[in-house]
Amino acid sequence: MLLLLLACTAPPPSSADDTAADGGAATVDDTGADGGTTSPGVNGRLETVSGQSVLYLWGSRYELGYAEGSLTCDRVADLFKYYLLEELIADYTSYEYQVVRGVVIGSTTFQPGDLEEMQGYYQGALDHCTEEQLTVHSDLLEDDSGGSRMLEIEDLYFANALADFGCSSLSVWGAASATGDTVHARNFDWASDDDGRFLSDHIVKVYDSTDEGARFLSVMVPGMLGCVSCVTEEGVALTMHNVGGLPTTTPVGISPRMFAAREALLATVGATDVAAAAEAVLEERPQNVGNNLHLSWPMARAVDGTGAAVLEYDGASDHQDGRVTVRGPTGDPEQARTDAVVTTNHYIARSPAPTSGDSWERASLLRQAIDAGAPLGGLDREGGRAALETVAGGYGELTVHSVVVDSAARRLDLYVAPDPSTPAVLGPTRALDLDALFGAFDQ
């Protein structure tokens, strides 16, 4: 592993005095921004904003990762134990962890920048966390571990090569939106662990990435460095959804889809045609599973009066559309409106859509919510949240987090499940001002 030297290259995103980190996360519980937690020589700062942990990261890809690994020590091992071992390995496969890890990593190709950020994360954790914080205790570990071992960088590679999530989302604009501008709402469904650590570890990461030339935010847990629910400073949002997919023709060289989604989203920065810019990236990033990437943008960025599209995406390069089929509102035969799109966990334009089942039912409920809201002035943020409530718990799993992005207000409403039995949309609203989040880098 190539370990680079860390250097501070940008000012911290806060005017508050820095305080030394003890390896743990900030626990301030207030409705504003607290003084935060940072550490000398680290390009990051962990704060609490509107009751939500917010991690500001700035610099190169390596520096972004190093700061995240350094400032989330009390959450570093959780991703591996509670997501990889206790959920994916225990519940979804009969194979031993070391076998699954070897197969997944062996068929995956990471881009250089993605590797640098993961290596930075791992080194930051080694430099700033205690041995106990980096140690995992589980009977699901390799036989020769004795039920306990420290995290390895290959564990981080494995975590970022996977993304096993259901989900539901909608976007409205024009007459279907209360403001006329785009509202994007999504549920992130996943089988949360019984202890709720995946919930309590949720964090908003706000990036000022010099290597990628972009500012964006991601709602996720530490250690997952790609995009599942992301928004750029320009207000372009991307949310990821599982799909069964078409047969792939690419057994090796798979591009990790969270990283592919991140690269596709950042390709939209400054682009005239948002969907086309994202599509161009994805055509070069083969997959072995199906994806619906729901992309939305403010109407000021619209080139044809459309505020969103779904990029139906997999590894089948021999499909007539290539690896990506771009579906706008007119590509959905069950959606009569031209000012809305919905997506759940099936293709609609890329292959024949189902006519029944959980995913189909959730898509139908979202269309109904849009149709019901339009005569009343269109959906606002609360209307988006209410629509998500009707489809909470996709595939019978827990809705772990929900987001509503309001382009007109430049606001993101975040909901995180308060416990393993309560959907996120029934939890408290964590209102986040996009201008304030990204503007923190300019202070």
Image (cartoon, helix red, strand yellow):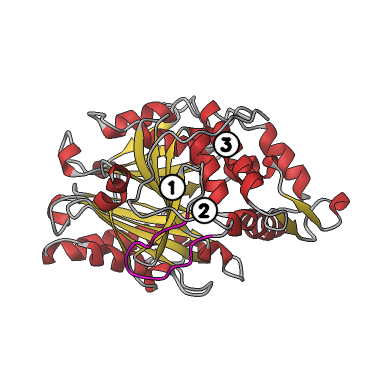
Nearer the observer, 62 or 401: 62
Residue type pointed to by label 3: Asn
Q: Which residue was labeled with disc 1?
A: 240
How crowded is the residue under tag 3: few (<14 C-alpha within 10 Å), some, or many (20+)? many
In the rendered structure, the answer to whether residue 402 lies left or right of residue 164 reads: left
Kindly state the secondary structure of the residue where label 2 is placed.
loop
Residue type pointed to by label 1: Met
Dot 1 or dot 3, earlier in sequence: 1
Nearer the observer, 135 or 182: 135
Marks 1 and 3, Cα distance to the nearest angstrom?
A: 15 Å
Label disc, if present, on residue 288 of the rendered structure = 3
Dot 1 or dot 2, earlier in sequence: 2
Kindly state the secondary structure of the residue where label 3 is placed.
loop
- Identified at 57% across, 69% down, the residue is 196
Residue type pointed to by label 2: Phe
Label disc, if present, on residue 165 of the rendered structure = 2
- The answer to whether the residues at label 1 and label 2 have Cβ atoms under 8 Å apart is yes
- Please indicate, yes or no, whether residue 374 appears anywhere in the rendered image: yes
Instruction: Give the quadrant of residue 356.
Output: bottom left
Residue 400: image location, x then y, percent: 47, 63
Q: Tell whether position 30 is magenta.
A: yes
Please identify, in this view, whether the residue under mark 1 or under mark 3 is nearer the observer.
1
Provide the major secondary structure of the magenta segment.
loop
Q: Which residues are magenta?
A: 25-37
Marks 1 and 2, Cα distance to the nearest angstrom?
A: 8 Å
